[in-house]
Amino acid sequence: MKDAKISCKNSGTLDYAELRIVEMAETFFIRSVMVQNVIMGIIVAIIVAILIRCIRRQKIIHVILVVVWGLIALWFFNGPLWGFSAVTVSPKGLEIHYGFLSVFRNTTLPVDTHWKVNSYKGGIRKLKNLYFFQLPDHRSLKIRGADKFEILEALGAAIDRINGRPMGKVEERPVNM
C-alpha cells in the first residue's frame, strides 16, 4: 500500500506519503466548546457590567477591584484548573481549543505528540469513574460515560492513524488512587 500511486488530473501521480498529507482535519468535541464559551461570556458580561457601573459612579476603588476580578477570571481560564474541550487533528498538528477567554492556552501541538487517556475517581466518595485526555502540558475536561470515553479513544486512534504508529495508550488505573 505504501508504494501505491494515484493518478491526478493536474499534477500526474501522487504517492502514498503525499496522499497522507492531504487528509482532512477531524475535530473531536470532548465537551461542548459552545457551553464553555457561554460560561466565559457570562462571566465577561458580569465583569464588564459591574465595571461600567463603577466607572459611571466614579468609584475608583471599585473599578480597581473589578479589574482585579477580571484578571483572576482570565488567570482561571488560562490556568491548570480549566481543561480543553476540543481537539482538531490534522497533518499540520493538534489544535487544542479551550475557549475564547483562554487566549494563552489555545495552541497547536506537533502531530507526533504522545497522548494518554487517564481514569480518575471523582465525586465526594470517589465512586464516579471519570476520564480525561492528556497531552504534554495539557489536560482535557473530565468526562463520564461510555459514549464520551469512546470519543477519547477515537481521538487517540486519529492521532495514531495520522502518525502511522501508536503514540499513546489508555491507562486503566485511576491517577488519584
Image (tube, helix red, strand yellow):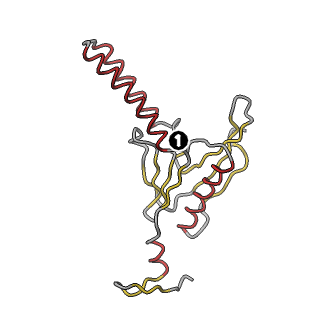
Residue 119 pos. (x, y %): 68, 45
SS at mark 1?
A: loop
In the displayed structure, 149 sits above or below 1; it is above
Q: Nearer the viewer, residue 83 or 37?
A: 37
Q: Is residue 46 left or right of residue 148?
A: left
Q: Is residue 71 left or right of residue 4?
A: left
Q: Nearer the viewer, residue 160 or 85?
A: 85
What amino acid is labelled 1 in the image?
Gly
Which residue is at a point 68% across and 35% down the rendered structure image? 122
Which residue is at a point 24% across and 13% down the rendered structure image? 58
- Place residue 18 in its image quadrant: bottom left
Residue 163 pos. (x, y %): 54, 67
Which residue is at a point 53% across and 67% down the rendered structure image? 162
Number of numbered discs overlaid on the protein picture:
1
Q: Which residue is mark 1?
A: 83
Query: Local crowd at mark 1 within 10 Å, few (<14), some, or many (≥20)?
Result: many
Q: Quadrant of the C terminus?
A: top right
Which residue is at a point 72% across and 50% down the rendered structure image? 172
Residue 52 pos. (x, y %): 29, 21
